[in-house]
Image (cartoon, rainbow, N blue to C red):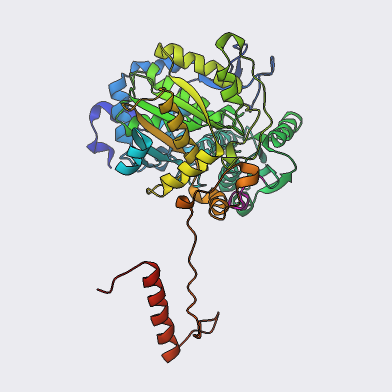
Amino acid sequence: MNLEYLPRKIRDNLIPAPAGNMCYYCLECGQRFDIHRLLYTCPDCGQVLMLEDTDFQRLKNIDGKTWREIFDARQMLKLPALRGIYRFHEFIGPIIPLEAVVYLGEGHTPVIEASSQLQAMAGCRLFYKNDGQNPSASFKDRGMASALSYINYLLRQGKMENVLAVCASTGDTSAAAALYSAYLQPAVRTAVLLPEGKVTSQQLAQPLGSGAKVFEIPGVFDDCMKIVEVLSERYNVALLNSKNAWRILGQESYSYEIAQAFDYRTADLAVVVPVGNAGNITAVMNGFLKFLETGIIDALPKIIGVQSMHADPVVRYYNTPAGKRKFKPVTVKPSVAQAAMIGNPVSMPRVIRLVDKYNDMAGRQRVFFVEVTEQKIMDWQLTANRHGHIACTHGGECLAGLQEALARAMVTEDDTAVLDSTAHALKFVGFQDMYFQGQLQRSFNVVSKPELINLPVKIRPGGLKLPQPGEPLTGRDLERFVQASAETVALQLNLKKG
Ligand code: F0G
């Protein structure tokens, strides 16, 4: 839409110019550091960092209603830089000029209301936000668009050159990192470290296809993470894990989009997210907090973090009474929510701070954690998809987590749940195959329920010539084959002659 058609009152604010004053901020010791180099941990105390706009107060010069109008009007503009996560430019990367924004179609993923049958089964009003409909088929593209736009900004200023971007990954971060870096090649190249045999074949294919250097490492994600930490401390590489605070900023867009999708009425929402390395839940909390502080929303939604019992360090921490909590990493067991199979989440210190801040700002407990069995993750994923969704196993984990949260009255039937399907079902389809073939039992502790199994039926009419590769049937043979196959399919479907 042409700018001229939009109200004069907001027109001057629709296309944002660089503003603000960003710095890294240490959650532990409160020190601030210049952003003109990539920094991942506090040089003084070693703690993970967040990014902060020290001039955030200026955003309060615009009232909440006007902000809402600005974001809604931006939805109608065709400017590529504002079509993705930078629709919320002032809240994500205000110093980044729009020319430096890398937009590959991320963000603004559909929010799909579940069918009445699924809502009845689930026990409350329910939506899926399909983050698998991002370009690399997971939510990681949000943070990657932010991190690579920042790198692009430094490249354009001549403050960086020949970047080698690295990350450890359970599959999705590496797919997103490789995709966004490929867009900026040759200035940016990527190398990714994956736990051998613990990413799906689709996830392995993604960075290979984008031209990244792929290393398979024995062990689990936590081992890969330790290795990239050493690389980023000793060598001149850009770390693209969510330890990089630019990733968190981009992922905050998930909260902004939920607010916008529900017309900024967030009081009765329960936002359900899977927790692995805990970057996502960090960003989701921080995003809602920033919108509350600027009056764009007037209430913080509930947030439910879900973990599998096979990888549950965050749940264990919060299950301990408040005064006695001490974070302990866990040794993970195989999980169908494989991308969240993490025993020592890098963002745990951020989570600990932000959960307290979130609950304080809300004046009551609004962040909850629950854990679920592998069985429930699979059963609810398959059930969701049988009702028209494209939820990945982590999306199934959210629905299983919602059940637990309802059972424990953390969520009530008056709430509206928004579930994060963090990736596309197709990335994790191998787990569905194993479930259908009854092969998940041993390591995952999952029994395939007959009513959820679906296998193809082979049609091979007997005593007839069948089509062979490169040898199509013709004439009478083709006719007999078609007739016999149609009869067999009709019999299978119990069809009546019409
Ligand atoms: N869902 C999916 C599909 C993921 O890929 C991840 C994390 C999570 C949930 C958990 O999110 O780590 O922010 O708490 N995947 C990372 C990776 C670790 O390397 O792709 P988190």
Left or right placement of residue 276 versus residue 192 in this view: left
Taking the image in four quarters, ligand 1 sits in the one at top right
Residue at the bottom extreme?
A: 476
On the image, the x and y values in percent for residue 295 come to: 34, 18
> Eyeballing the image, is 357 above or below 335?
above
Residue 324 vertical position relative to residue 211 in the rendered view, above or below: above
Q: Quadrant of the C terminus?
A: bottom left
Is the residue 131 above or below the residue 209 in the image?
A: above
Q: Toward the viewer: 258 or 119? A: 119
State whether residue 233 is above or below residue 486: above
Comparing 198 with 493, the one in front is 493
Residue 35 seen in this snapshot: no
| Pick the front one: 311 or 243 | 311
Q: What secondary structure is the magenta-colored segment mainly?
A: helix
User: In percent of the image, x 40 and y 68: which residue is there?
Assistant: 492
Image spot of residue 399 (x, y percent): 44, 36
Q: Is residue 201 magenta?
A: yes
Residue numbers of the magenta segment: 198-205
The picture places residue 453, in percent across and down from the top left corner, at: 49, 54
* Residue for point 43% across, 45% down: 383
Left or right of 409 on screen, residue 6: left
Q: Quadrant of residue 228?
A: top right
Location of residue 472 in the rendering, given as x and y in whole percent from the top left corner: 49, 84
Residue 172 visible in the snapshot: yes
* Magenta stretch contains residue 90: no
**Which residue is painted at 71% across and 31% down in the image?**
229
**Quadrant position of residue 150:** top right
Residue located farthest toward the top when viewing the structure as drawn: 323
Which quarter of the figure is the N terminus placed in?
Answer: top left
